[in-house]
Image: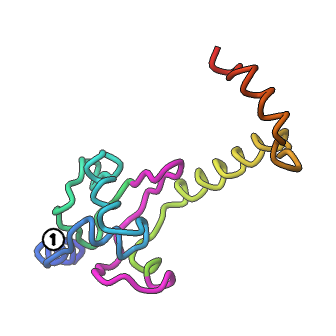
């Protein structure tokens, strides 16, 4: 019974990977989705993806978007971009992926705790001192 469902899903027409990523709201435009796929940031079933590759129900995607990493399973096919709630119904994220993302956000938050933003922009005298010192970090 399960093999019949998988065979039917594999034979059913899919949607282009870049279109599906755009519809699922992982990327704001199809062009950004295509650029990420071509840059090796998206894997389909543990293989490098191509923008024109068809996505089917049951496919597993590994998506890297800036500092975020998603491991998802395709639950539904969509080629129209809609509301966020509708986009989230197109996939299911693994628990391990969700926990890793939460931990990464918390780690980045803790790294910023010692930084205090200056209350104002530097004035003319302070800017001249900064320029005279040069970029100390570059040395």
Q: Is residue 57 magenta?
A: no
Crowd class of label 1 (few under 14; some 14 to 19; many from 20; radius 10 Å): some
The tally of labels here is 1
Q: Residue at the location (24% across, 48% down)?
A: 47
- 61 sits left or right of 9 in the view: right
State how the image is colored.
rainbow
Mark 1 lies on a secondary structure that is helix
Quadrant in which the N terminus is drawn:
bottom left
> Residue 34: x percent and y percent?
27, 59
* Nearer to the camera, 67 or 60: 67
Write the start and end of the magenta stretch as one range: 63-86
Extreme-top residue of the structure: 139
> Residue 118: x percent and y percent?
85, 45
* Nearer to the camera, 3 or 130: 130
> Residue 108: x percent and y percent?
69, 45
Q: Say if 64 sits above or below 114 in the image.
A: below
- 131 sits left or right of 76 in the view: right
Q: Residue at the location (31% across, 84% down)?
A: 80
Quadrant in which the C terminus is drawn:
top right
Extreme-left residue of the structure: 11
Q: Quadrant of residue 28?
A: bottom left
* Nearer to the camera, 39 or 122: 122
Q: Say if 102 sits above or below 123 in the image.
A: below
> Label 1, on which residue?
10
Q: Quadrant of residue 51?
A: bottom left
């Amino acid at each position: 019974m399960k093999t019949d469902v998988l065979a039917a899903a594999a034979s059913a027409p899919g949607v282009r990977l870049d279109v599906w990523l755009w519809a699922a709201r992982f990327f704001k435009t199809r062009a950004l989705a295509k650029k990420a796929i071509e840059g090796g940031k998206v894997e389909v079933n543990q293989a490098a993806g191509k923008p024109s590759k068809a996505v089917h129900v049951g496919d597993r995607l590994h998506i890297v978007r800036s500092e975020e990493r998603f491991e998802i399973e395709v639950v539904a096919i969509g080629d129209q971009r809609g509301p966020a709630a509708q986009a989230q119904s197109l996939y299911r994220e693994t628990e391990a992926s969700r926990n890793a993302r939460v931990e990464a956000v918390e780690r980045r938050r803790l790294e910023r705790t010692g930084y205090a933003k200056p209350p104002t922009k530097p004035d003319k005298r302070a800017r001249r001192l900064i320029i005279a010192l040069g970029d100390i970090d570059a040395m």
